[in-house]
Every structure is written in C-alpha cells, then in structure tokens.
Image (tube, rainbow, N blue to C red):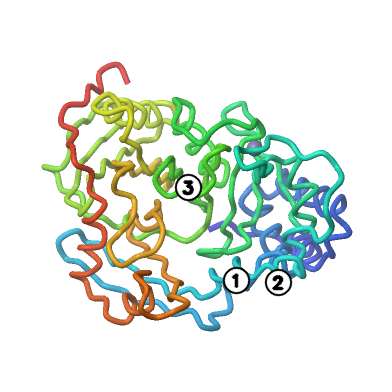
Amino acid sequence: MNTYNKEYKEIFKRIAGSSIKKKEYILDRLNHLKTHQGLAYALMALYRQQVESGFVLADPLKYKGREEKHFFDHKTGITFCLQWNPDRELRKNHKLLIKRGVISEKKEKRILVNLDENQKPCYLCKANIDIQNPNEILLPISLANETYYAGANFAYITNNHFTLMSLEHRRQQYHKKIPLVLNDFVFCTEGIFRAVFNCLAGASIKNHEHMQIFTESLPIEKISIKDEDIIYQKDNLNVSQPYYYLPVYVVEGSSKNRTAGAVDRIIQSWHEIDNIYHTENIITTMQDNQFRIFVLLRDKRRLTGKWKKGDMASFEAGGHIVLSCTPKTSGNNEPDERKLFESADIESVKELISTIVPEKRLNNIDFKSV
Ligand SMILES: [Zn+2]
C-alpha cells in the first residue's frame, strides 16, 4: 500500500473540494499529483472532486439504499456478489442530470462531432463532452503510445469507477493493442486500479472505443487454479483454464508484452471460429508486479442473463452482478431485478451466468512464439 505524505494529501483535499469553475486549476493539480504520487492517486482525487461537486449522482462511499449479498462457491473458490444499487437508476432522471451538470441545459449551437445514424453526437468524443457535459473533467492518460481520457462514471457501479475512452473516434471493437493498453493502465496505477474491456458484450456505446476502470476487486480474482488447469507455461508466462460457469482463461506473468500477446492469441483463436458472433470480456489486474488477466469468451447472441435486464458485461461475467431495475408497471414482461435480488441463492447466480455461455467451444490455442 502506498503512503502519501502530508503535502500531497493536502493537494488531494483541495482538488476534492474545488468547484467545477476551477477546471484548469484542478487539471494542473492533478498533473502535479500524477507526477509525484502516481496516476492512481490523481485519479482518486479527481473521482472525489466529481463526487463532491455532484457530477457523480450518488456517493459510492455512502451506502444509502445499497445492499449486497455474497455467496461462496466452494467449486470455484469464488464469493459471488449481488449488488442492489438503486443509485444506478438515477441516470434515467433527466432533471437531475441537468441539475448536476451531467448534461447541458441549453440547446447547443456549437458544433458537435461524429453524429450517429440517429443524428446523436458521440457521447465519448472529448470535443462533445466539453460542450455537452459541463461538469465532467477528463484526465488525459498516455497508454501504449496512445492518448486516452478518463472520465468519472456518473452512475457508478463501484468506487473510483471511470470510463476510459480513446482520443480517436473509432468503433468499440477488439484490436491487437487492446490487451496492451489495459496492461499499461494497471501498470501505471501499480495495480491499484483494475481495467475491463467489455468489447461487444455489455458496452452500451458501440461507436467509440472505451474501457472501464475502478479500484474494487472482482470476485473472479479469487478463482482457484489447480496445477491441472494450466494449459501453457514458459518463462514466467502461465495460461490456465480453471473451472468456472463461463469459459475463462487466466493469463499470468510479469511481462507486459508477453501477457498481452497471450491474451491476443486467445482472442484471435476465438474470433477465427466465428468472426461474426464471437466477442469477449477482458478483466486486467496486477498483483505483486504480476499481470493477471481474465479472458471470458462471449457470444453476441447470448448477452442477456435470465431474469436480468440489459446485457451482462465484464462485472457480471466476473461474478459481480449489478441489479437496480424494477418494472414501472406490473404485468408486463420486464424482468424484476429486485425479485431476483431477494430470492437469489448460489444456484440462481450460477444459472444466471450459465445463460450467457457461448454455443461453440475453443479447444486449441497456439501459444508458440508469444
Ligand atoms: Zn466518439
């Protein structure tokens, strides 16, 4: 655990307490923190500022209305988490979004870029955020020689939850550099943050490449890996396929490039079987200077879980099930997530995850020359 000295704690506090009107001052201080105390500390300061200023719609550290249930599963070693998070629903409250400066009230005359087929400007292009999301502060981060921006997620799932978006407007889809960007990010935060890429299983914005970053661990990080689960091992690179309710590969090693290369090999092999429907969730973590990356194989035809609304993303695939939605009217066929939360047990959690298991299997992966 890092220790932060008094001077930097003071800067952290000043950032957290600053009004959004001091955007330039905040960015200047954040860069100072980033240089002297590392990226993770700067991100946590920014997140606090975004909570204190009201941009993040509710404070993740205040447990008002939020409930959690935990189920230990001895077969996988994982303690699954069901989170009842009514704060997530605040994102649908238009008036509140305007009040908090999440979205702009006035009709914008300035030019917005990259309109989609419905003439809606891209939500993740910095140029549009600067105009449309007046209270959002984006922190630029250089990863694998490319610029990304971190912006606090106004409807959080966990504490310090950001969206990380590419500077360039390009589609949300897998490419070779993705695992390296994720690795570089967790490396720059010394493993304090996790990084996940939903690809096309759980991402709500498909027109702009983005990832999620946050500080809480995911249940899958505790998965038990036995010797017989190892499918490749060479020079401090381990790939294993432990028992789980979704096909998962765990890549471990100290090399940023080689672990990213092994992840790429798995994903390319998965796409080779079916390049229309196959997609993936990637969860990247770092512990004791070792990268630990979880690659979950997904199928675009199996995105929603039984009894749950919306697509299952990396959080759910990683054992952290987020529930917030109750139907507005009774009698329609909308899933009631509160009911699911109340009646859940380990069997229903396993069943929920099993409903998104892809049709096809991946058998042979060639890790030679990784
Ligand atoms: Zn964009």
Residue that carries the numbered disc 2 in the rendered image: 96
Say if disc 3 is inside 8 Å of ligand 1.
Answer: no
SS state under label 3: loop
Rendered location of residue 201, percent (x, y): 39, 45
Q: Disc 2 to disc 1, how far (Cα)?
A: 8 Å
Residue on which the image places disc 3 = 203
Q: Position of residue 336 (x, y in %)?
A: 37, 74
Position in image of residue 114 (x %, y %): 68, 35
Q: Image point 76% across, 51% down: which residue?
A: 132
* Distance between the alpha carbons at the discs numbered 3 and 2: 24 Å
Q: Callout 2: few (<14), some (14-19), or many (20+) C-alpha neighbours within 10 Å?
A: some
For the image, the number of numbered tags is 3
Q: Which mark is residue 205?
A: none
Ligand 1 visible in quadrant: top right
Looking at the image, do the residues carrying marks 2 and 1 touch, with CB atoms under 8 Å apart? yes
Name above or below for residue 210 compared with residue 219. above
Q: Residue at x 82, y 39 (%)?
A: 111
Earlier-in-chain disc, 2 versus 1: 1
In the rendered structure, which amino acid carries the disc numbered 3? Ala
User: Does any atom of ligand 1 lie closer than 8 Å to the CB of label 2?
Assistant: no
**Numbered disc 2: secondary structure:** helix
Residue 302: x, y in percent? 29, 48
The residue shown at (36%, 58%) is 316
Q: Is mark 1 within 8 Å of ligand 1?
A: no
Question: In this figure, which residue is indicated by the disc labeled 1?
Answer: 90
Q: Residue furthest top?
A: 369
Label 1 vs 3, first from the N-terminus: 1
Disc with the residue nearer the chain's start (3 vs 2): 2
Q: Relative to residue 316, is residue 12 drawn left or right? A: right
